Amino acid sequence: MFYEYDRRGATQYARGWALSRNPKFQDYEEWGGNCTNYISQCVNAGGIPMDPYGDNVMKEWYWYSDKKRTPSWTAAQPFFEYFTRNNNDNTNNFGAYAAESNYEEMELGDIVQLIKDGKAYHTMIITGILFAGDEVYDYLISQNTYDLLDYPLSLKVGERRYLKIFGYYM
């Protein structure tokens, strides 16, 4: 059965924790950054359940403790790989459904990553959309690691890729 992503829930969580840390989770700021850990929390708050069911750790996405977590929960490139490669193609019919997308198709709760040489090094979430008439003028992003709340995406320097979260199968 397919369940849609709760964009509002993800966005509310993102806004609530953009400038601070949820004490229920480890803060990875001192180990290279907390951005993807924060984004995973946001996506999870949007109803996407943790996924401990893959046939290897790169096909799973969860955080139970600092010592019991997957790279896809806390690191930008493994996060992208889990969310774009999972897509319900495993035999247990469970997990997130997402796809790489383009700028024009982004919605609240979708993910933006900064990339270099094809690899993600930073992850952000869309928490606002600015319109000029019917056209998208800019997106507002929130992030941890250089904490930002509703910051204009147009001011972020670097190559980007976009990840649309659709929901999950259970």
Image (spheres, rainbow, N blue to C red):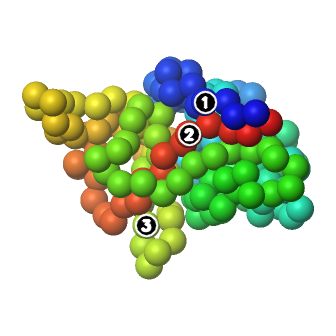
Q: For the C terminus, which image quadrant?
A: top right
Q: Which mark is residue 19?
A: none
The kind of residue on which mark 1 rests is Glu
As helix, strand or loop, the secondary structure at mark 2 comes to strand
As helix, strand or loop, the secondary structure at mark 3 comes to strand
Q: Crowdedness of circle 1 by 10 Å Cα count: few (<14), some, many (20+)? A: some
- The residue that appears at 86% across and 55% down in the rendered structure is 91
- The residue that appears at 87% across and 50% down in the rendered structure is 92
**Is residue 17 shown above or below 104?**
above
Q: Position of residue 122 (x, y in %)?
A: 48, 57
Q: For the N terminus, which image quadrant?
A: top right
Q: Which mark is residue 115?
A: 3
Find disc 2 in the rendering and name its residue: 166
The kind of residue on which mark 2 rests is Phe
> Is 61 on the left-hand or right-hand side of 19?
right
Q: Quadrant of residue 60?
A: bottom right
Query: Which residue is situated farthest in the front direction here?
Result: 1
**Is residue 115 shown above or below 153?**
below
Looking at marks 3 and 1 on the same chain, the residue that comes earlier in the sequence is marked by 1
Foreground label between 3 and 1: 1
The kind of residue on which mark 3 rests is Ile
Q: Which mark is residue 4?
A: 1
- The residue that appears at 42% across and 73% down in the rendered structure is 116
Foreground label between 2 and 3: 2
Q: Position of residue 23 (x, y in %)?
A: 70, 27
Q: Is residue 70 visible?
A: no
